Image: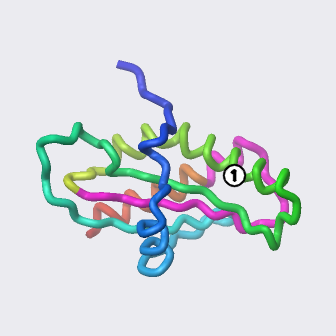
């Protein structure tokens, strides 16, 4: 069975409540130039939802103070989404999401844009650190 490299609507963090909770109560992992803000919440088990539906949601962002032009911000966000999309299957195989809801938000903090491969390596490193923290707790 092949890995599914998708980033669909169900995988996107769009809820304002979830995003506000993420930024107010979330913890952070920094792998320069990426800052990963995350929350892990326990959910009651339900039988009507398929497995992994909406249990892992992610968002991306780039500061408008650093990237003044929308074209630059959109490029950085596109690179972050692509890196997450490619690393998500590895993260799901390593992390155990037993009735846990995980929200992620990737922020790009540097003023210079790295290449796609470098950003992907940093996202992979940040997700690996998150897996280690999830296994400890």
Up/down of 66 relative to 47, above or below: below
Residue located beneath label 1 in the image: 77
Q: What range of the chain is rendered magenta?
A: 100-122
- Is residue 101 rendered to the left or right of residue 116? left
Q: Which residue is drawn at 45% across and 60% down?
A: 15
Looking at the image, which residue is at 51% across and 42% down?
Answer: 87
For the point 49% across and 31% down, the residue is 5
Indicate whether 110 appears above or below 56.
Answer: below
Task: Using residue 55 as the reference point, say whether residue 6 is left or right of it.
Answer: right
Q: Which residue lies furthest to the front in this view?
A: 16
What is the quadrant of the N terminus in the image?
Answer: top left
Neighbor class of circle 1 (other Cα within 10 Å; few <14, some 14-19, many 20+) is some
For the point 42% across and 60% down, the residue is 103
- Residue 109 vs residue 127, the one in the foreground: 109
Q: Is residue 107 magenta?
A: yes
49 within the magenta span:
no
- Decide: is 62 above or below 27: above
Q: Find the residue positioned furthest to the top.
A: 1
């Amino acid at each position: 069975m092949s890995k599914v490299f998708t980033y669909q609507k169900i995988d996107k963090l769009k809820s304002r409540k979830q995003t506000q909770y993420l930024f107010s109560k979330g913890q952070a992992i920094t792998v320069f130039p990426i800052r990963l803000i995350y929350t892990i919440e326990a959910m009651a088990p339900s039988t009507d939802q398929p497995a992994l539906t909406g249990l892992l949601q992610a968002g991306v962002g780039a500061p408008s103070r650093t990237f003044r032009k929308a074209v630059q911000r959109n490029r950085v966000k596109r690179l972050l989404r692509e890196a997450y999309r490619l690393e998500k299957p590895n993260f799901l195989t390593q992390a155990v999401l037993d009735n846990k809801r995980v929200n992620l938000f990737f922020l790009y903090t540097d003023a210079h844009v790295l290449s796609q491969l470098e950003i992907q390596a940093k996202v992979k490193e940040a997700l690996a650190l998150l897996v280690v923290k999830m296994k400890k707790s």
